[in-house]
Amino acid sequence: MASASLLEFYREELLRHQACLEAQREYFSELAILEAEEAIARVTAQLEGLIPSHDGCALLESVLRTFDQVTGLSGWTDPSHLH
């Protein structure tokens, strides 16, 4: 069974990318949004099988970096963490 903490981490990261994408919806075509949402859903559905595989975490890290290139999530600052 996949590590529950890793599973939860990747699931939360994918949800954050999805929320970020939704917040930027006006800047993307409907097709781009649909394809990104489908990709996030596919990866989310396969998480439990990917994590225990030999290179699953490396693959998921690559996927998150790819999503980040689209959403720019890593550049966003959570206002609740500012002083």
Image (tube, rainbow, N blue to C red):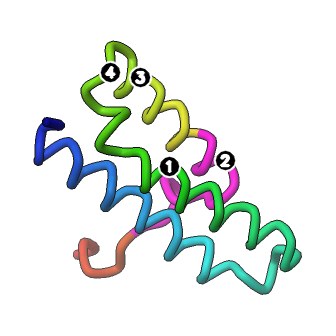
Callout in the foreground (4, 3): 4
The magenta stretch spans which residues?
66-77
Residue under circle 4?
Answer: 53
The x, y position of residue 23, in whole percent, is 60, 83
Residue 69 numbered mark, or none: 2
User: Closer to the N terminus: mark 2 or mark 3?
Assistant: 3
| Residue in the image at 12% along x and 38% along y | 3
Amino acid beneath label 4: Ser
Residue under circle 1?
Answer: 43
Residue 74 shown in magenta: yes
Q: Are marks 2 and 3 in contact (CB under 8 Å)?
A: no
User: Closer to the N terminus: mark 1 or mark 4?
Assistant: 1
Q: Secondary structure at mark 3?
A: helix
Q: Majority secondary structure of the magenta segment? A: helix
For this rendering, which residue is in front, 59 or 68?
A: 59
The x, y position of residue 71, in whole percent, is 63, 61
39 up-or-down from 30: above or below: above
Q: Are marks 1 and 2 in contact (CB under 8 Å)?
A: no
Query: Image check: 61 left or right of 3?
Result: right
